[in-house]
Image (tube, rainbow, N blue to C red):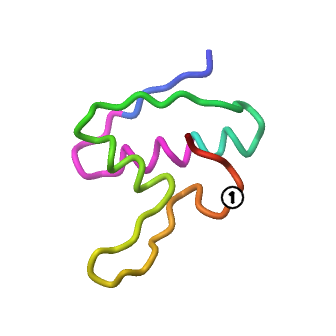
Amino acid sequence: VNSGIIAYDVGVGKTMSAIITLANAMFQGKCKSPLIVVPNPTYEKWIREIIGYTDDKTKEFVPGVLSNTGIKVN
């Protein structure tokens, strides 16, 4: 019932589309504790996109989709 498939080409933004869709569902109260399962090679990319990261060159923090939202990520 509440499911979907993202089937874009490589480099179009499947990861970001999924994270934004998930964040939107959380903000609307449609889910509280989502479980995200991703392949090992994409795990770090997902974490960086969700919670943010510190840029190696500039040492500046690049916020993720859920940065500054108060949503905790385990």
**Residue 70 found in image quarter:** bottom right
Q: Quadrant of the C terminus?
A: top right
Q: Position of residue 11 (x, y in %)?
A: 25, 52
Q: Position of residue 57 (x, y in %)?
A: 27, 81
Q: Going 38% across and 45% down the picture, which residue do you hit?
A: 15
Q: Going by the image, does 24 lie left or right of 5?
A: right
Q: Position of residue 48 (x, y in %)?
A: 40, 56
Q: Which residue is mark 1?
A: 69
Q: As displayed, is residue 69 above or below residue 59?
A: above
Q: Is residue 16 magenta?
A: yes
Residue segment shown in magenta: 7-21
Residue in front for this viewpoint, 46 or 10? 46
Q: Going by the image, does 50 lie left or right of 73?
A: left
Q: Residue furthest right?
A: 29
Residue in front for this viewpoint, 38 or 19? 38
Q: As displayed, is residue 17 above or below residue 33?
A: below
Which amino acid type corresponds to the residue marked 1 in the rendered image? Answer: Thr
Q: Going 46% across and 74% down the picture, which residue do you hit?
A: 61
Q: Secondary structure at mark 1?
A: loop
Q: Going by the image, does 37 lie left or right of 72?
A: left
Q: As displayed, is residue 12 above or below residue 42?
A: below
Instruction: Tell me the crowding category of disc 1: few under 14, some 14 to 19, or many 20 or more residues within 10 angstroms, Cα based.
Output: few
Q: Quadrant of the N terminus?
A: top right
Q: Going 54% across and 48% down the picture, which residue do you hit?
A: 20
Q: Position of residue 46 (x, y in %)?
A: 39, 46
